[in-house]
Image (spheres, rainbow, N blue to C red):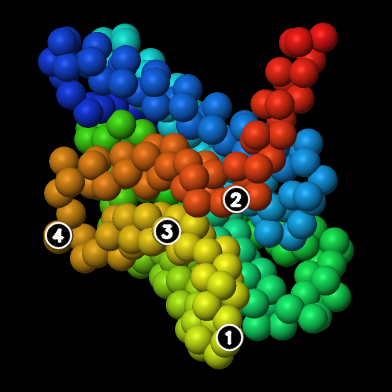
Amino acid sequence: MANQTTVTEFFLLGLTSGPKTRFVLFGMFVIVYGITLMGNVVILMLIWLDSQLHTPMYFFLSNLSFVDIWYIISIIPQLLTNLWIPKKTISFAGCGAQIYFFFGLAITECVLLAVMAYDRFVAICYPLRYTLIMNQKVCIKLALAAWLFGFFLAMVHVVNTLQMPYCGPNVINHFYCDILVLLKLVCADTHLNEMIVFVIAVLILLCPFSFILITYVHILITILKIHSTQGRRKAFSTCVSHMTVVALFYGSAMFMYMRPGSSHSPDQDKMVSLFYSIVTPMFNPMIYSLRNKDVKGALVKVLQRCNVCHGT
């Protein structure tokens, strides 16, 4: 222990070291960053401006869009900096902050997706009691619980990871501070820490995902009992967007954090991380807008108002 040195910063290897590839990736991620921010801001704006979207379903969707905005803000600016500047470093405190916000937002999204499934379950299975069950107070409490739960568990992650001794090397083979990669740099036994990460992963991924599956089984049974073909189609269409987002997010996150440690490959982990941390937040507003008549209708109304304003 006497020979240990205090690590004050980490060196991120990033996605690539080739200069030409770095500039191509920089341009690509600038575009992705812009599309993601614009898409989620538009969703928030439409829900705020259109009174027809002031319902529990869109209240939770606005929370999801807000999560996705900050989700990419916690990752992409650092990634762009590292692609532009040859020295790809992040301070010890900065690494801890990135872990906290990244996992806080990720866990919040996990819980929000489960809450959104519950909202669809009540709307389809108990339509006459929907407004009574999913009243404004209940919606606010559910959303607040998702945020508090997410950032509480994120704090557990931060304390669990950063309290360990780091005595070098300080090279992280990733494009952001990821717990699984960071624990490999600890110069002490990390079995307990890895177990905590796995248990939390099961808690925040498997439990909500199982709950979502159970709710959709009940939803499917209820939809099949609807006699009208149009009624079945309308009920099912309200769930398709949510199911698509759940499949994209949970599928990639489970693949990343619920595999045995021996099966992890640095390059593979980077690709999977890219998908659920950057690609999924970009696709979410597209999925909800392209398959949702209410959102498309609200967008048309806003554009018509803008045309009228410009015309006058």
What residue appears at the point 21 percent right and 60 percent down from the top-left corner?
261
Q: Quadrant of the N terminus?
A: top left
- Residue 226 tag number: 1
Q: Which residue is mark 4?
A: 263
Q: Are marks 3 and 2 in contact (CB under 8 Å)?
A: no
Q: Which mark is residue 244?
A: 3
User: Sequence order check: which comes first, mark 4 or mark 3?
Assistant: 3
Question: Which is more N-terminal, label 3 or label 1?
Answer: 1
Q: Vertically, is 201 above or below 224?
A: above
Mark 4 and mark 1 residues within 8 Å of each other at the beta carbon: no
Q: Position of residue 212 (x, y in %)?
A: 51, 73
Whether tag 1 and tag 3 are in contact, CB under 8 A, the answer is no
Q: Is residue 86 at all visible to an observer of this figure?
A: yes
- Residue type at the position of mark 4: Ser
The disc, 4 or 1, on the residue closer to the chain's N-terminal end is: 1
* Label 4 – label 3 distance at C-alpha: 27 Å
Report helix, strand or loop for mark 1: loop
Label 2 close to label 4 by CB (< 8 Å): no
Nearest to the observer: residue 46 or residue 140: 46
Q: How many marks?
A: 4
Q: Nearer the viewer, residue 24 or 149?
A: 24
Give the residue at mark 2. Answer: 293
The residue type indicated by label 2 comes to Lys
Q: CA distance from mark 2 to mark 1?
A: 21 Å
C-alpha span from label 1 to label 3 = 23 Å
